[in-house]
Image: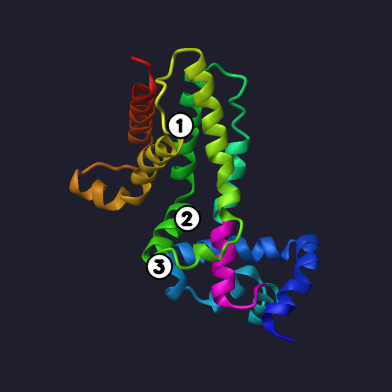
């Protein structure tokens, strides 16, 4: 029996006893710190309290585990977005909450940022191996599009908003504060991780997006 086939047969058991989630939690940290090439299965096994055989039993290979960890990082982000509950708020407060919460998620989960950066170094080679990744991320665009349509209908948002472009702008502004924390922090002699700097930067990002979408 191959490692890959063992992984498939073991999935139901992994869901029941939490082994798969435990491995993924550790793998996310290891891959985010060292990338695919630098991460070590020995380390993931040791920090999971398992042996290497169990890692391969559940995931088949190091590359398969990396793909699973990459997928999980996106799933967790989208799950958090589904809990924002912005549909009951007026458009501007709803967008303000969405942008602020997105900024906070990026700051609280640097492992997600590092995983995305690592996969871009790989030129997206492995993200293409996640068959339903576009479906996973479609919810983010659907949520934002629904919000924008409400704002347009009420006359508070401009009518020519490109939802995907808006999503990328929110992501880029939120991403930078983490991805460039050490470089920009050194260059400008500013601790981007400090609570007061985080709060001020968060306000700037939220206001920037709101000013962009407001109807003239």
Circle 3 residue: 122
Image quadrant holding the N terminus, namely bottom right
- Per the rendering, the mark at residue 111 is 2
Q: Residue at x 69, y 65 (%)?
A: 20
Circle 1 residue: 99
Q: Residues within 10 Å of mark 1 (few under 14, many from 20)?
A: many
Disc 1 to disc 2, C-alpha distance: 19 Å
Q: Residues within 10 Å of mark 3 (few under 14, many from 20)?
A: few
**Label tally:** 3
Disc 2 to disc 3, C-alpha distance: 16 Å
Across and down, in percent, residue 4 comes to 68, 78
- The rendered magenta stretch, by its main secondary structure, is classed as helix
Image quadrant holding the C terminus, namely top left
Say above or below: 11 vs 92: below
Q: Is residue 64 magenta?
A: yes
Dot placed on the residue nearer the N-terminal end, 1 or 2: 1
Say above or below: 103 vs 66: above
Across and down, in percent, residue 48 comes to 63, 69
Say above or below: 184 vs 196: below
Q: Which residues are magenta?
A: 59-72
Residue at far front of view: 160
């Amino acid at each position: 029996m191959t490692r890959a086939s063992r992984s498939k047969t073991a999935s139901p058991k992994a869901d029941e006893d939490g082994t798969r989630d435990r491995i993924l939690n550790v793998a996310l940290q290891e891959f985010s710190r060292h990338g695919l090439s630098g991460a070590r299965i020995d380390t993931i096994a040791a920090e999971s309290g398992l042996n290497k055989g169990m890692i391969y039993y559940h995931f088949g290979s190091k590359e398969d585990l990396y793909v699973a960890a990459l997928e999980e990082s996106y799933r967790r982000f989208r799950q958090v977005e589904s809990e924002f509950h912005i549909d009951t708020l007026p458009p501007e407060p709803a967008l303000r909450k969405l942008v602020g919460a997105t900024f906070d998620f990026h700051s609280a989960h640097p492992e997600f940022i590092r995983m995305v950066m690592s996969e871009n170094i790989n030129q997206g080679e492995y993200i293409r191996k996640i068959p339903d990744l576009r479906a996973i991320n479609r919810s983010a665009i659907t949520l934002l599009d629904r919000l924008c349509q409400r704002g347009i209908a009420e006359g508070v948002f401009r009518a020519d908003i490109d939802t995907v472009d808006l999503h990328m702008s929110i992501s880029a502004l939120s991403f930078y504060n983490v991805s460039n924390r050490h470089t920009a922090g050194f260059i400008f002699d500013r601790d981007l991780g400090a609570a007061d700097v985080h709060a001020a930067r968060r306000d700037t990002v939220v206001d920037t997006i709101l000013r962009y979408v407001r109807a003239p």
